[in-house]
Each structure stands twice: as structure tokens, then as C-alpha cells.
Image (tube, helix red, strand yellow):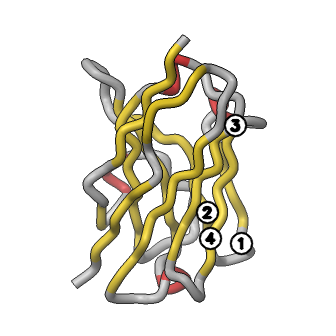
Amino acid sequence: QVQLAESGGGLVQAGGSLRLSCAASGRTVSNYRTMGWFRQAPGKEREFVALIKWIGVSTFYADSVKGRLTISADNAKKTVYLQMNSLKPEDTAVYYCAARTRGVGIYTSTSDYDYWGQGTQVTVSS
């Protein structure tokens, strides 16, 4: 059984920082081909934020977060991180961690992922 558990969300002022964590259980993180972060704001669809691929250890970001958010992973801790800097009110959302176990492409759709965490709330005040 694969389980993903997010943590680290909270309330922060605009311009501030947060670091989200996604702890994986059941398998080592590197056995997942791709780990991703998504977010969902009230009344909006869930959208792609960032991903990290274990083949080449490459990363990919949504244009809206480039230069402000950084995805990384620690396989020994079975944990994926999302460092969030220069936060804006429009970053307010529930942030979800996701895992995909096959393929070598760039996957930015929710349907591309096999496992999901329950989410952590991030609120950025102006």
C-alpha cells in the first residue's frame, strides 16, 4: 500500500516562505518515476505546480511558480519537499503531493498520477 502524507502548510504573509513536505510510505521515493506537487484554490480545478523525476533527477515547474518554488527530494527520508519563497496571495490553495510509477515523460495532468496525498492548506495574506 502506497501512502503519501503532506505537511508544512499554514498561514503566511505575502513575501514570506513555507516548506511543504510529502512523506512516502510503502516504497522508497526513488522507485516512483515522477513525484509531483499540485494545488487547488477554492472554486478552481486542481493545477500542476512542480515535478521531480528520478531518471536524471530533473525538475519541471509551472510558469506561474518558476523562480519562487523549488522541488527537491531526499530518498533516504522517503520525502519530497516544496520550498516556497516570495509567496503571493494567489498561491493560496490546498497543496497535494502525487506519485507516478511508470513512464519517462513530463506529466502535468492530475490523471497522469497514480497516488495522492490528502493535501495541506497554504494561505497567503496580503
Which residue is more in the foreground, 58 or 26?
26
Which residue is more in the foreground, 29 or 13?
13
Left or right: where does residue 114 sit relative to residue 29? left
Query: For the residues marked 2 and 1, what is the alpha-carbon distance in whole angstroms?
Result: 7 Å
Q: Is residue 25 above or below residue 53?
A: below
Q: Which mark is residue 86?
A: none
- Residue under label 2: 52
Query: For the residues marked 2 and 4, what is the alpha-carbon distance in whole angstroms?
Result: 8 Å
- The reply to whether discs 2 and 4 touch (Cβ–Cβ < 8 Å) is yes
Left or right: where does residue 31 sit relative to residue 67? left
Circle 4: is it few (<14), some (14-19), or many (20+) Cα within 10 Å? many
Query: For the residues marked 1 and 4, what is the alpha-carbon distance in whole angstroms?
Result: 9 Å
- The reply to whether discs 3 and 4 touch (Cβ–Cβ < 8 Å) is no
Q: Secondary structure at mark 4?
A: strand
Of tags 2 and 4, the one toward the viewer is 4
Image coordinates of residue 125 in percent, x first then y, are 50, 17
Q: Is residue 77 above or below residue 52?
A: below
Type of amino acid under label 1 = Val
Image coordinates of residue 35 in percent, x first then y, are 50, 65
The residue sitting at 30% across, 66% down in the picture is: 115
Circle 1: is it few (<14), some (14-19), or many (20+) Cα within 10 Å? few
Left or right: where does residue 3 sit relative to residue 106? left
Q: Which mark is residue 57?
A: 1
Query: For the residues marked 3 and 2, what is the alpha-carbon distance in whole angstroms?
Result: 18 Å
Mark 2 and mark 1 lie on one chain; the one further toward the N terminus is 2
Of tags 3 and 1, the one toward the viewer is 3
Of tags 3 and 4, the one toward the viewer is 3
- The reply to whether discs 3 and 1 touch (Cβ–Cβ < 8 Å) is no
- Residue under label 4: 73
Q: Secondary structure at mark 2?
A: strand
**Picture quadrant of residue 42:** top left
Which residue is more in the foreground, 1 or 8?
8
